């Protein structure tokens, strides 16, 4: 086992996809604070991932993979086996947003958006088989979105994928009944991240008008709920927990 992997010994392990920034990075910090060693997944952003690993005192390991590739997911699972030998919590956070109205979105762009749920499905399948089912223990936490419930103009493909994450949560919780593996979703609302930072100011103001708290959420406020589901919440299963400041009541 590598020097980094040695630091995971005798610690529960959480793997977070799309962990180099925003909500993913906040989840890594929160899970580290709960005593987890953290597998920090990234696709291209190695430097932020390395900085995050240093921030959590090296108590984890890096995982590079394009979740559009089943082969790279398989290689990622093999790296987890080498570095930690276990996964106690999987946080499916990685995502992308291709925003176009239906009349102008190209089929290739729609297919690119579909990778989000496909990659989460396949990684979850592999983690369950290799780590969780044989130990009869684990937590799977899917990061979805409020727009998977409310819809949003110009984001049909994205909202379809986020709704799919919640459908996966509910179905998988039923499939795993009796195995002591809990599956839940966290659905953030309007969170201050790089993705929302690209929105025009007029759009941001209109969205904020729908939030009863009158402000954007913070990534760490979403991560608090993820950490709660990871380290406690023993009677919550197959649920979607909304973190949106009153934007939508679920």
Image (cartoon, rainbow, N blue to C red):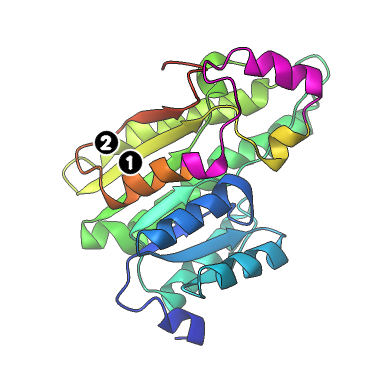
Magenta span has 214?
Answer: yes
Report the residue at 42% width, 44% height from top.
224
In this rendering, is residue 232 above or below 187?
below
Camera-side residue of 93 and 215: 215
Q: Dots 1 and 2: beta carbons under 8 Å?
A: yes
Q: Residue 163 bears which disc, if any?
A: none
Task: Give the residues in magenta.
Answer: 199-222
x 47%, y 45%: residue: 223
Q: Which circle marks residue 237 in the picture? A: 2
Q: Is residue 174 left or right of residue 56?
A: left
Residue 162, image x, y percentages: 54, 30
| Position of the C terminus by quadrant | top left
Q: How many marks?
A: 2
Residue 186 is covered by the magenta coloring? no
190 w.r.t. 78: above or below = above
Please tell me which residue is depicted at 45% across the width and 80% down the height of the picture: 5
Measuring 71% from the left and 37% from the top, which residue is drawn there? 195
Query: Hey, which residue is sitting farthest front in the picture?
Result: 214
Residue 81 rendering spot, x and y as whole percentages: 42, 73
* Residue at numbered disc 1: 183
Q: Secondary structure at mark 2?
A: loop
Q: Pick whichever, 242 or 108, lies toward us.
A: 242
Image position, residue 165 (x, y; %): 48, 33
Mark found first going from the N terminus, 1 or 2: 1
Quadrant hosting residue 86: bottom left
Report the Cα–Cα distance between label 1 and label 2: 6 Å
Relative height, residue 88 to residue 171 (above, below): below
Q: Residues within 10 Å of mark 2 (few under 14, many from 20)?
A: many
The answer to whether residue 154 shows anywhere in this view is no
């Amino acid at each position: 086992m590598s020097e980094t992997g040695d630091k995971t010994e005798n610690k529960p392990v959480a793997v977070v996809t799309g962990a180099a920034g925003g909500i993913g990075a906040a989840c890594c910090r929160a899970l580290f604070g709960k005593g987890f060693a953290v597998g920090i997944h990234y696709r291209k952003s190695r430097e932020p991932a390395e900085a995050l690993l240093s921030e959590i005192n090296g108590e984890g390991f890096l995982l590079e993979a394009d979740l559009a590739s089943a082969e790279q997911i398989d290689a990622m699972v093999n790296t987890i086996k080498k570095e930690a030998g276990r996964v106690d919590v999987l946080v499916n956070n990685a995502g992308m947003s291709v925003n176009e109205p239906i009349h102008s979105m190209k089929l290739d762009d729609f297919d690119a958006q579909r990778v989000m749920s496909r990659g989460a499905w396949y990684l979850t399948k592999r983690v369950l088989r290799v780590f969780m089912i044989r130990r009869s223990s684990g937590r799977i936490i899917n990061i979805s979105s409020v727009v998977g419930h409310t819809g949003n103009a110009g984001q049909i493909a994205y909202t379809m994928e986020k709704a799919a994450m919640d459908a996966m949560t509910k179905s998988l919780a039923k499939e795993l009944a009796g195995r002591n593996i809990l599956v839940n979703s966290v659905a953030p609302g309007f969170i201050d991240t790089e993705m929302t930072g690209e929105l025009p100011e007029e759009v941001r103001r209109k969205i904020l008008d729908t939030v009863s708290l009158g402000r954007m959420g913070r990534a760490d406020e979403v991560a608090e709920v993820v950490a709660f589901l990871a380290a406690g919440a023993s009677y919550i299963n197959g649920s979607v927990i909304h973190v949106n400041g009153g934007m939508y009541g679920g």
